[in-house]
Every structure is written in structure tokens, then in C-alpha cells.
Image: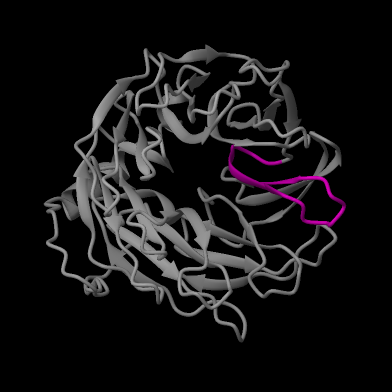
């Protein structure tokens, strides 16, 4: 089971490395824009990120093209409805995770992309109009997956950490101009098989901490930040970590402290660990998703009752599960419907894409190479699927 579930997707990864190897660092000219990749891409949209990239007031979406892909697909929202056709930007081999942040203090959003097969992280500086400069690549340790962005050393500049299959973290401290220092690698101390990562101050000391899940040996780890760009050895937990795949830090009970949520592949659940405020956590509580092999998820109030709700992508049966919040930090039974494609590795991103005051959902279907948009009805349900090719 562990071998079959491996994030490496070994056959696909090997083919991707053969087709897309030879990544090089691109010289970046001021104000330059990357051209669309002229070669056909067998894209498989995977993990997305959302933000207003062109300043029109509407959230846009960026998907990594994981399945034999060598880049990302940018979907700008059309104010008249839906998305404009995807624009593809080359990165390294097998782009995996995307983060969006202003890396060079110009008030324009930039992109950070991990490249699973080429062991790099790509930086694409934004032009402010929804287009991006050519990628500049930095080396990481073996097989970077999830990426987080924050100011780890409190110098006012954003830094990057990638969660690698090595097993390790790679920390790249930012110079404040969109460039980064060489990576420093941190051992995970036998935390093996990273599906995701996040960033939060779990113990309230004012320093950012790293969160990582390990699906091979079923552990959740917190690396407490020292505030200088370095981190303590991990605190490892097994409660709620059964094949821990995708996780995030969110305050789900409204007490101002970041809690932990993780999907558990084999059990078909999402587990929650409520933060006690000192870096320790209450016993895990598991919520069945009603689907097979729950992958990624998002948390937001989709029915307007003031409680966070949970929306989960189940890759095993290509379904989406909605678990409405019933009390602070508590979720109800799942309501499940088709994802709109095959094998959704993607996070089901929740945002108000048509600015009607209701949260909508976008999901990437990795197996069929399309993304699906469903407009929210404001009551926890969603409308009919609208399909876009990645």
C-alpha cells in the first residue's frame, strides 16, 4: 500500500524526468515576461494557489502541472464569468506545489513552484498584470513537494521552505529582492513520505514553526522556529497521523490558536488536533469523508453560519465531500458528489470567483487534465460543473 501510494508516482516521475530534464537557470531581464511553452504538454493539474494576480479585484488560480508537466497553468478570472484560457509557464520538471507572495517588495505578487523531478524551486516574479517573468531555479534537496513562505528570521524579507522526500526540509532565506541564498537542509529524523506542509506559530512564542506530515511512517511533525531562520529538531506525533497525506494549520474553533488538520489515506478520514496553546494538542478526532483515498482539502465558511466547513477531494473515487461545521471545531457527516474528472490530486480551492458574496470551488482533475469550477449557492451546496482544460 505504501509503495502504491508513494507521492513519487514512480513510473510517471521517471517518464517526466526523461522528457523534461535539462532544467537551467534563466537570466531575468527587468519587466520581462515568460512566453507560453510552445511544446505540447501532458498536463495534470495538481496543487493550486489562489490570489488576485492582475489587480482586477477577482481571485485568480495557479495550478501546478504535475502529471508529465514541466510548469504551471495560470487561470485568470474573467469578470464576465468563469476563467480565461490557461496560460502555461515553464518551470522545472514535474511542478508540484505553488505558493503566491510578494517576494521583492514591489507590491506585486510572485510565484514559488517546487519541481519534484528536477530537485529545484522556481521563482517567477510577477509583472502585476497576471503575467510572469521567466523562472529562476534554486537547488533543493531530493524531490521537493510542499512549499511554505514566511519570514523565518524576522528580517522583513520572505523566506522559503520546501518539504522534501529526501527526507528533509530545504530552507532558502530571502534577500528581499526576489533572490534567495543557497538552501540549508534540515533532517526530518526519519519522517518519511511528505505529502504536504504548512506554517504557523503553534506555541505562541512569536516565531514561525513548520508543520509536516509523513504518510509512509504515519507521523505528524512540528519544527519550532528559533526566529533566526533555524528550527528545533522535530516534535513527532502519531495521534491522527495514519498515512498523513495533506495537512494544514487553521484555527477551526475560533480561539485564535492554529489547529492541525490532516487527511488519512487508508482510513478515508480527515483528523483534527485542537491546539492547547502551548504547542501541545488535544486527542485527534477523525471525520470520515465518505470517499476513497481523501487527498487534499480546504477549510472555509461556505454556508454563512460563522463556522468553518471542510471540503475534501477523494482521489480514489474522484469525488468531493462537503462536511459542514456543526459547532466550533466540529464537523458533520459528509455530502459527496463527483469531482468533474479523474483522480483529483488537487486542493479544492474555495474563493468567491464571481464576487457574489458566496464561496465557489475549483478542483484540478489530475488524471483527465482539466479543472472544474462550481459556483457556490451560499448554503453549503454548489452548482453544476464548468470545465476548463489545463
Q: Answer yes or no: is residue 9 visible.
A: no
Q: Number of marks in the image? A: 0
Q: Is residue 369 left or right of residue 309?
A: left
Is the residue 320 above or below the residue 50 in the image?
A: above
Who's the residue at 41% across and 39% down the image?
151
Q: Nearer the viewer, residue 134 or 46?
A: 134
Residue 309 part of the magenta-drawn span: yes
Residue 203 position by quadrant: top right
Identify which residue, 187 or 181, lies in the foreground. Answer: 181
Classify residue 83 as left or right of residue 373.
left
Residue at 23% in and 59% down: 135
- At 40% across and 77% down in the image, what residue appears? 129
Q: Nearer the viewer, residue 315 or 173?
A: 173
Coordinates of residue 173 in the picture (x, y in percent): 29, 38
Residue that lies at the very extreme toward the bottom in this rendered image: 80
- Which percent across, then down, holds residue 169? 34, 28
Please provide percent x and percent y for residue 94.
30, 50
Q: Quadrant of the C terminus?
A: bottom left
Q: Going by the image, does 97 lie left or right of 177?
A: right
Q: Position of residue 283 (x, y in %)?
A: 72, 15
Q: Residue 354's quadrant in the figure?
A: bottom right
Q: Which residues are magenta?
A: 291-312
Amino acid at each position: 500500500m505504501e509503495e502504491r501510494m508513494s507521492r513519487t508516482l514512480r513510473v510517471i516521475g521517471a517518464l517526466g524526468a526523461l522528457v523534461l530534464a535539462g532544467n537551467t537557470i534563466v537570466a531575468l531581464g527587468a519587466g520581462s515576461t515568460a512566453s507560453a511553452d510552445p511544446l505540447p504538454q501532458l498536463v495534470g493539474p495538481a496543487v493550486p494557489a489562489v490570489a488576485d494576480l492582475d489587480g482586477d479585484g477577482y481571485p485568480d488560480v495557479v495550478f501546478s502541472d504535475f502529471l508529465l508537466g514541466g510548469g504551471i497553468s495560470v487561470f485568470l478570472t474573467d469578470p464576465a464569468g468563469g476563467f480565461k484560457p490557461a496560460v502555461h509557464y515553464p518551470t522545472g520538471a514535474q511542478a508540484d506545489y505553488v505558493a503566491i507572495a510578494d517576494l521583492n517588495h514591489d507590491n506585486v505578487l510572485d510565484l514559488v513552484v517546487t519541481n519534484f523531478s528536477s530537485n529545484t524551486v522556481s521563482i517567477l516574479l510577477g509583472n502585476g498584470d497576471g503575467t510572469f517573468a521567466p523562472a529562476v531555479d534554486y537547488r533543493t534537496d531530493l524531490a521537493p513537494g510542499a512549499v511554505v513562505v514566511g519570514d523565518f528570521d524576522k528580517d522583513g524579507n520572505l523566506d522559503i521552505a520546501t518539504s522534501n522526500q529526501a527526507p528533509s526540509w530545504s530552507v532558502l532565506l530571502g534577500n528581499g529582492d526576489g533572490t534567495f541564498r543557497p538552501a540549508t537542509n534540515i533532517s526530518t529524523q526519519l519522517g518519511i513520505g511528505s505529502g504536504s506542509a504548512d506554517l504557523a506559530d503553534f506555541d505562541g512564542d512569536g516565531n514561525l514553526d513548520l508543520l509536516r506530515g509523513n504518510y509512509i511512517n504515519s507521523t505528524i511533525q512540528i519544527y519550532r522556529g528559533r526566529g533566526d531562520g533555524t528550527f528545533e529538531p522535530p516534535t513527532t506525533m502519531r495521534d491522527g497521523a495514519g498515512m498523513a497525506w495533506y495537512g494544514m494549520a487553521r484555527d477551526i474553533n475560533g480561539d485564535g490558536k492554529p489547529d492541525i488538520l490532516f487527511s488519512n489515506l487508508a482510513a478515508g478520514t480527515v483528523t483534527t488536533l485542537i491546539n492547547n496553546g502551548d504547542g501541545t494538542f488535544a486527542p485527534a478526532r477523525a471525520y470520515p469523508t465518505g470517499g476513497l483515498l481523501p487527498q487534499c482539502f480546504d477549510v472555509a465558511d461556505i454556508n454563512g453560519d460563522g463556522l468553518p466547513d471542510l471540503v475534501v477531494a477523494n482521489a480514489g473515487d474522484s469525488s468531493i465531500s462537503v462536511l459542514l461545521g456543526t459547532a466550533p471545531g466540529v464537523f458533520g457527516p459528509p455530502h459527496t458528489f463527483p469531482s468533474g474528472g479523474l483522480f483529483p490530486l488537487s486542493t479544492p480551492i474555495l474563493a468567491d470567483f464571481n464576487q457574489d458574496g458566496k464561496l465557489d470551488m475549483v478542483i484540478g482533475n489530475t488524471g483527465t487534465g482539466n479543472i472544474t469550477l462550481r459556483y457556490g449557492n451560499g448554503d453549503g451546496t454548489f452548482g453544476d460543473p464548468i470545465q476548463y482544460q489545463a
